[in-house]
Image (cartoon, helix red, strand yellow):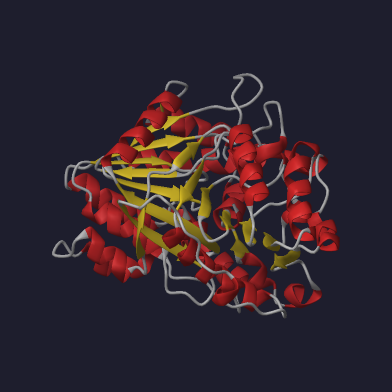
């Protein structure tokens, strides 16, 4: 990291990642700084798949999205595909999971991947959840990615790689992408525990086909019951996509890279980079890419949420002074009982009022190289404007973080060991 932590991080990373297959790190993206290449050409180098999508439905209220998702499940006639990082039953999600069960029992093919840490959730969901294994009794094809098995414990490096994507595909037509998990704090709570986040619903057979292809890959890597893309035929829609978009699906056996996507955008930025990251732990190459943008006269604005969990706060406060020292325009938000604000879990990036990144990927080291992630970059000024307006509304509860305050927070509340844990595991 910056200065004194570099050696420790290198040693720890070697121990954690021994025997572990990971995706391309941010450091491999230097070629994307070539000014002769267009953003689109850089996206192609990073493995982005170009699709045409319609303007999406945007959901920033969890219960509104939950109602829409339940409706999509109830409308399914052929198949339902679900991938989520944290998935568990809670009372507020009973209607959704009952609908999933009913569809499976009625003969609709339901395939669901949950990450292996779902049953070991460390958030407020831990006291309000029940594992999803019972869904198998209804005919749901449910598997865990990288569970805490004896084999994985023997090779602990493999446990570092997590399935962090949040995706739903219904009948090869409807797709949802974003940051909400299928658990208590993302969808089921009715108090301050309910996170603020975003999900986007697309009526797009083209996007659905691209998502199905990657789902088949990870399913076949994880399950002995193999499937093929032919098992999930494309649907039809009355809407034609007219927004150029680029899908980055960073999964097993893929050269697709979140790092390349962000590097392509940052290195091509001409006016402004606006980021709403969660757990913004940057490595030196991320700093370099953004600092290069600053030297070109690009404004870099970062809006930071604060996690009320003490160990996460300690990690964030230990590191945030680096963002200010780098010259970025940093605003910070406090969350918790004293503010009435729940955790802001949303991930968003808007570049030059044109390119908007949505999906599961945080803008940090872990999402660049240690997790399976999904991001969709939309090339549409209207969508970018709507996204920036939402950021503006969120910023009303934030204030500028100056260097003196950042250094004081580091001294009084920062934790180096929490930072190390969060850098790799957050």
Q: Residue at x 61, y 20 (%)?
A: 340
Most foreground residue, 229 or 342: 229
Quarter of the view holding residue 153: bottom right
Q: Residue at x 35, y 70 (%)?
A: 28
Quarter of the view holding residue 228: bottom right
Q: Position of residue 215 (x, y in %)?
A: 57, 68
For this orientation, the residue located farthest to the left is 36
Most foreground residue, 242 or 399: 242
Quadrant (top left, top right, bottom left, bottom right) of the N terminus: bottom left
Please tell me whether residue 176 is drawn above or below residue 21 in the rendered image: above
Say whether residue 106 is left or right of residue 393: right
Q: Position of residue 367 (x, y in %)?
A: 50, 58
Q: Position of residue 188 (x, y in %)?
A: 71, 37
Q: Position of residue 171 (x, y in %)?
A: 57, 59
Q: Residue at x 46, y 40 (%)?
A: 57
Say whether residue 394 is left or right of residue 30: right
Task: Say whether residue 1 is visible.
Answer: no
Say whether residue 101 is left or right of residue 214: right
């Amino acid at each position: 990291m910056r200065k004194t932590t570099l050696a420790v991080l290198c040693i720890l990373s070697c121990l954690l990642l021994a025997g572990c297959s990971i995706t391309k790190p941010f450091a491999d993206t230097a070629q994307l700084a070539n000014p002769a290449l267009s953003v689109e050409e850089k996206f192609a180098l990073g493995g982005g798949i170009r699709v045409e999508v319609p303007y999406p439905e945007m959901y920033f209220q969890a219960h509104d999205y939950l109602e829409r998702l339940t409706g999509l499940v109830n409308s399914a006639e052929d198949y339902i595909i679900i991938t989520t990082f944290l998935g568990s039953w809670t009372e507020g999600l009973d209607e959704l999971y009952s609908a999933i069960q009913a569809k499976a029992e009625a003969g609709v093919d339901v395939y669901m991947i949950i990450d292996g840490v779902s049953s070991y959730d460390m958030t407020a969901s831990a006291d309000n959840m029940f594992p999803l294994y019972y869904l198998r009794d209804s005919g749901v094809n449910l598997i865990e990615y990288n569970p805490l098995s004896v084999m994985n414990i023997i090779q602990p490096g493999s446990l570092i790689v997590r399935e962090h994507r949040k995706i739903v595909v219904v009948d090869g037509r409807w797709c949802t992408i974003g940051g909400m998990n299928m658990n208590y704090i993302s969808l089921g709570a009715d108090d301050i525990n309910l996170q603020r986040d975003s999900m986007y619903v697309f009526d797009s057979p083209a996007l659905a086909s691209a998502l199905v292809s990657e789902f088949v890959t990870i399913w076949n890597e994880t399950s002995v019951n193999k499937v093929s893309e032919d098992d999930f035929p494309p649907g039809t829609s009355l809407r034609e996509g007219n927004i150029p978009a680029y899908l980055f699906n960073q999964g097993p056996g893929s050269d697709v890279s979140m790092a390349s996507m962000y590097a392509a955008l940052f290195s091509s930025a001409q006016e402004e980079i606006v980021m709403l990251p969660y757990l913004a732990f940057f490595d030196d190459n991320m700093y370099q890419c953004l600092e290069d943008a600053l030297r070109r006269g690009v404004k870099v604005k970062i809006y930071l949420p604060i996690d009320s969990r003490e160990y996460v706060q300690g990690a964030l406060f230990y590191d945030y002074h680096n963002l200010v020292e780098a010259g970025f325009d940093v605003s910070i938000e406090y969350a918790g009982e004293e503010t009435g604000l729940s955790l802001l879990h949303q991930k968003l990036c808007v570049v030059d009022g044109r390119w908007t990144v949505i999906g599961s990927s945080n803008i940090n080291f872990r999402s660049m190289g240690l997790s399976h992630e999904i991001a969709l970059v939309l090339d549409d000024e209207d969508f970018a404007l709507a996204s920036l307006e939402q950021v503006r509304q969120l910023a009303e509860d934030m204030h500028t973080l100056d260097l003196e305050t950042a250094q004081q927070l580091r001294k009084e509340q920062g934790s180096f060991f929490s930072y190390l844990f969060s850098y790799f595991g957050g």
